[in-house]
Amino acid sequence: MSLRTRIPVALLAAAVVVSFSPLPAHATVTSRGVTIPDFYTPPSTLPSANGSLIRSEPLPLALSLPGIDSTLPGTATRIMYKSTDSNGNPVAVTGAYIDPALPWAGLGPRPLVVLAPGTMGQGDQCSTSLALQRGLIIGSADNQTTISIGYEVLAMYRLLAKGIAVVETDYVGLGTTDRLHTYVNRVDEGHAVLDAARAAKALPDTSIIAKSAVGLYGYSQGGGAVASAAELQASYAPDVRLKATYSGAPPADLAAVTAAIDGSELVGALAWAVNGFVQSEPELAPLLDNYLSDSGKAALKNLSTMCVGDAILGYLDQHSSAWTKTGQSLSDIIQSEPGLKAYLGQQLIGTKKPTGVVRVATGVSDNLVPHAQARTMAADWCKLGGAVVYAPVSLPDVGSPLLNHFGPLLTDQGTAVDWLGLRLAGVPAISTCAILPIQP
């Protein structure tokens, strides 16, 4: 059974939303030639409490070393847990928990960090938990190829090296075979992050306890996810002991990000966002049908099973204006359609005071996830009384939006992990809101 037959939302190629039946028991699911393990197919009935464990199993890590008492950097467990989507409906989410082999040297019990991955794609084969097991995922079927690399392992292993336990979320629909990934959906992502913390603490026989402090880490898509989670914690998950958040290059204003990504190396992300929007708001489907050309519908369908590598190779530097009947870009269409504009407005991050201290890092030359909109989010949080450490990362413009975006990820990652470790160790951070107006 292919992704196209098991997820009718992928029929956005025809801009038609239809209902789907649950997969039959033990159905084999493949996506672009990659077999998705049965673990990722949710059961028909989910538990009622958010963060409840649905199932778990040992997860062999592609990158691990033998240690004296256990493997390094730790012992991994694949998890599926219950969350709630943006429509208030129950949803199963997968991820992975890694219990560190190294001790925690800070005060108090071992802390937990929820790692929200950066953009991986929209095909189920792109999930971070699967990448932790296989390292490099390559597939091919029906003239469709795929490649996915677990690049978040670097940040994860840096945290584990400090004795910090890590749980990562695959997000709603990425990995799980019952629906499409709702890419950059603010509420879906924020809930998935917070419920991952709950699920990790529900696992038996780990070295974290109920009182373990919680930190959040994310860059790019992950930066937006943890920023949303920091805003939603007070109302959605007050039991999660959130202490500090690192939000790198957050796509806080999707209208600004949509305009910036168009025509870049990562233009395929626009299709992932639109596909996810229509799954969450089916009323938008007829609107898309009015604008998308046959080639545009085909592009959205094709991209719905792609990972980042596939999208870059297949749609490098294309413009969304080639997908529409009118020759308008998706950004222009959003601005002209009140329904679409209102939906993106609901995705804005920066409207609620975040819980705990937040370090917002953004590259001043980032023109893929624009620096200005990330800085605005930090400034808006300051106005709301949030504890914000704003950290502009100054790197030269190298002429590539993708490299301008990922440069700060690499150069700032060590500093970000150190900063988060200190906060979880009980060292206070001083808000820099007072000097933000004079920072770039």
Image (cartoon, helix red, strand yellow):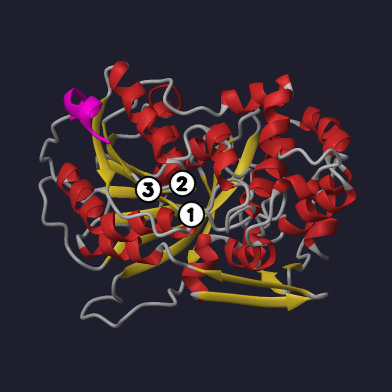
**Left or right: 268 in relation to 161:** right
Looking at the rendered structure, the kind of residue marked 3 is Ser
Mark 2 vs mark 3, CA separation in Å: 6 Å
Q: Nearer the viewer, residue 158 or 184?
A: 184
Looking at the rendered structure, the kind of residue marked 2 is Asn
Q: Which residues are magenta?
A: 432-440
Q: Secondary structure at mark 2?
A: loop
Q: Secondary structure at mark 3?
A: loop
Q: Which residue is mark 2?
A: 367
Q: Tags 1 and 2 in contact by the CB under 8 Å rule? A: yes
Q: Residue sitting at 84 percent across and 36 percent down?
A: 291
**Left or right: 116 in relation to 32:** left
**Left or right: 36 in relation to 298:** left
**Left or right: 177 in relation to 419:** right
Q: Secondary structure at mark 1?
A: helix
Mark 1 vs mark 2, CA separation in Å: 6 Å
Residue 380: x and y, percent?
A: 36, 22
- Rendering quarter of residue 429: top left
Q: Does residue 23 appear anywhere in the picture?
A: no
Q: Mark 3 or mark 1: which comes first in sequence?
A: 3
Q: Residue sitting at 19 percent across and 47 percent down?
A: 419
Mark 3 vs mark 1, CA separation in Å: 9 Å
Q: Which residue is mark 1?
A: 401
Q: Which residue is mark 3?
A: 365
Residue 399: x and y, percent?
A: 45, 58
Q: Residue sitting at 69 percent across and 50 percent down?
A: 319
Mark 2 nearby-residue class (10 Å; few <14, some 14–19, many ≥20): many
- Rendering quarter of residue 439: top left
Q: Nearer the viewer, residue 251 or 387?
A: 251
Q: Nearer the viewer, residue 285 or 242?
A: 285
Q: Quadrant of the C terminus?
A: top left
